[in-house]
Image: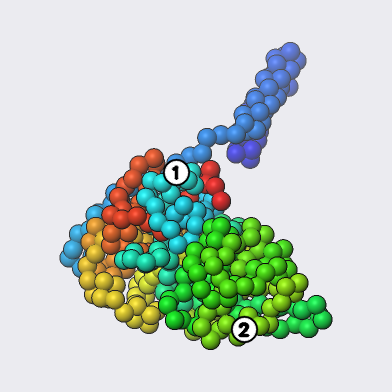
Amino acid sequence: MSFLFTKGFKFKSKYISSKFPRKSLRRSLLTAAAAILLFQAASAVPQPADAAGSIQAAVRTVKVSGTTFTVRTVKIPKGTPVTVGLAKRQVGQTDTLASIVKSYKAEAAINGAFFNAYGGPADPYGTLIINGQIAHIGRYGTTIGFRRDGTAVMDTVRPSLTGKVTGTDDRAKSWYATFVNRTPDAGANNTILFTPDRGSKVGFNGGIAVTVSAGVVTRKAANANTAIPKDGFVLVFSGTEKTMAERFTVGSRAEWSMSYTNQAGTTLDWSDVQTAVGAGPRLVTDGIVTLNAKAEGFTDQKILTASAARSGIAILPDGSILLATVNGATMTQWASVMKALGAKQAMNLDGGASTGLYAGGKTLTPAGRLLSSMLVFGSQVTK
């Protein structure tokens, strides 16, 4: 803009000749200078965001393979703040779509990971990353992640959690956790790590619990719904994994870290991913339909062959995000629909009665059940 203005000023000034009266020339120069100052002042004032920079909801009609689908979509600009909206702000709980949206001050939201919706603890099945920390481990499907710079990535993420405990004799021993923030099945042989994202307590009895606060083991005892310290974590050892608890003594120093690979075993650098939700299967890769649900570990016919309500999320070529829901489609049809909507990368989210979409102060697709997690977006989203 400054180039165009300067160019225009030169165009104007070349018509000023030496025959102009001196006062007229001075007035012309003063007028031009004032215009420059006014232009600069106007440029310094924050301007309202244009439509391209705002969250946009739409209803779109897509025809694939002779079938027409009505799809509700929400387009979200790249870099819009995002986090995982947990029911009651805890892993393993359920709540209404409206309550989750309100709790996180979301401007847009879509249901997230698959979860146990048919009795028992409402634990998720997919990977969850919240504020850069793992909140749940999933070992199937596809995960979408949002990096610190706002860039979105998508892959078949397979997390691995390992740790080290160092005794008062400075001898270090390794340990690992099978899951994070998940209630163990009866009779299972597991080591499960519980963080404050689980809530104030682990939520069940049984096993041996090791409490770590500020990096130091403060307690080891039979688990009786052990409290989770806000500045630490709890490890619960069940079944044959109870022998690993012997490596921990009160006063020892304990730490843990995450590593990530994809389904093919290739190491992934997800160290700067701040938010992630795992579900799947993958629908589109680099603009091409690449659906292979069985290869990602899915066996349920609701995913493989049936038609059902669907939720999905896509990364568009410009880096913006597209949320979408449809009332009924097979997964094959859903993949083609997401491609037709312009997806560069796309994946399925939990669907059926869990399908829910919100934007612009309205519920666009009402969920048919209480939800466990959502992806929530907006300038005022609370972490």
The disc at residue 102 is 1
Of discs 2 and 1, which sits in the foreground? Answer: 2
Q: Is residue 7 left or right of residue 296?
A: right
Which one is earlier in the sequence, the residue at label 2 or at label 1? Answer: 1
- Say how many tags the image has: 2
3D distance between C-alphas at marks 2 and 1: 42 Å
Q: Secondary structure at mark 2?
A: helix
What residue lies at 54% left-to-right and 61% top-to-bottom?
Answer: 201
**Mark 2 packing: few (<14 Cα in 10 Å), some, or many (20+)?**
some
Q: Is residue 343 above or below residue 11?
A: below
Q: Residue furthest right?
A: 169
Q: Position of residue 319 (x, y in %)?
A: 49, 58
Q: Is residue 262 left or right of residue 165?
A: left
> Could you tell me which residue is drawn at 35 percent across and 42 percent down?
362
Amino acid type indicated by mark 1 = Lys
Residue 312's image quarter?
Answer: bottom left
Q: Residue at x 59, y 61 (%)?
A: 227
Image coordinates for residue 380, horizontal then vertical, percent: 53, 43
Q: In the drawing, does residue 216 fall left or right of residue 92?
A: right
Q: Kindly tell me whether residue 216 is visible in this rendering.
A: yes
Residue that badge 2 annotates: 244
Decide which of 188, 335 is in the foreground and name it.
188
Looking at the figure, which quarter contains the N terminus?
Answer: top right
- Name the amino acid type tagged 2: Met
Element assignment for label 1: helix
* The quarter of the displayed image where residue 172 is located: bottom right
Q: Is residue 39 visible?
A: no
Residue 21 to residue 325: above or below: above
* Disc on res. 43: none
Horizontal and vertical percent for residue 127? 48, 69
